Image (cartoon, grey):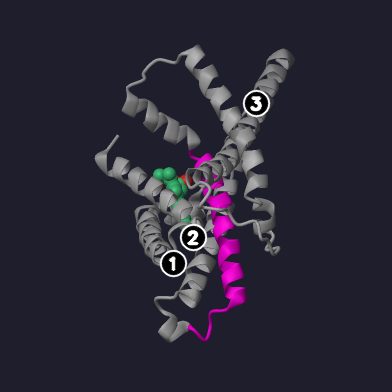
Amino acid sequence: MSPVFLSRLIFDFMAAGLLLFGLSYWWLGNIAHELAGCAMFLLVIAHNIFNRRWYGAIPKARREARGRLNMAVTVLLLAAMLVLLVTSVLISQALSGIMSAYGGFTARQIHALAAYWVLVIVSIHLGLRWPMIMGVARKLIGIAQPNILRTRALRVIAVLVAVHGVWSSFVLAVGTKLSMRTTLDWWNFEESVAGFFVHCVAVAGLYMFLTYHAMTWIHDGKRKNIDNSAHRVQSNG
Ligand code: HEM
């Protein structure tokens, strides 16, 4: 694994961390939020420069299920990130001297809406790359051989995270936030800071879990079809 690729992954996870930090607006307030947001957008721009070849390869890409889903998710992520960026500029307090005429309640609502959609879409984006991320983790820890006990333990942990994610979605009222309905369910950071981040990570974990298993299911279904056709050809021949 090249050091450049590893640094890219570290930047990716820093961007994800900053996204979660951005969701905690009421914890440290506006200045911290705007600075974290700027850093996240810079990392996301760098991320897209690193991945520029992927865009060039779109016309030649094979149109299998994973490839099509990956493309749709990337387009949605791009759209959600652009909405987040534009509304950030419109409602920024640092830029209020120049932009105040455009920022208002609706722009703030759209900003929060886009932020929660970005959380869900980035999680799907990561779920699509989960086998690669696990591969990197295995290399870093130095795991070479499969181990059934370890695999089972990790599966149990993944299921627990997903179940926690369902509960966290209710606690954080994620459904309400994704549908732009007005909510007074804002997290009380005076009660707990870590709790908020645990719930956000669990929600992200839930969407990664669902994406990873949906991909495995599609892949296994396709392999079964190929095996069945090979079997039919053999028995006919
Ligand atoms: C917090 C935000 C994000 C995180 C954590 C994230 C994470 C990742 C990871 C781990 C990879 C694979 C490793 C790599 O190439 O760096 C990746 C690939 C990629 N990402 Fe992101 N990403 C984020 C935002 C975005 C955004 C906003 C876009 C643009 C729409 C984007 C487009 C891509 C593309 C085009 C690839 C290559 C796809 C492929 O090779 O299949 N990412 N991302």
Circles 1 and 2: CB distance less than 8 Å? yes
Task: Give whichever of discs 3 and 1 has the lower sequence position.
Answer: 1
Seen in the image, is 108 located left or right of residue 94?
right
Give the residue drawn at x 43%, y 59%: 28
Residue at the spot of label 3: 226
Up the image or down, 59 lies above or below 148; here it is: below
The mark tally for this picture is 3
- What amino acid is at disc 1? Asn
Is residue 110 rendered to the left or right of residue 194? Answer: right
Q: Does the closest atom of ligand 1 sit within 8 Å of the Cβ of label 2? A: no
- Residue 62 visible in the shown view: no
Tag 3 secondary structure = helix
Mark number for residue 25?
2
Query: Toward the viewer: 87 or 28?
Result: 28
Q: Give the SS element for disc 2.
A: helix
Question: Which residue is more in the foreground, 230 or 146?
Answer: 146
The magenta segment: 100-129
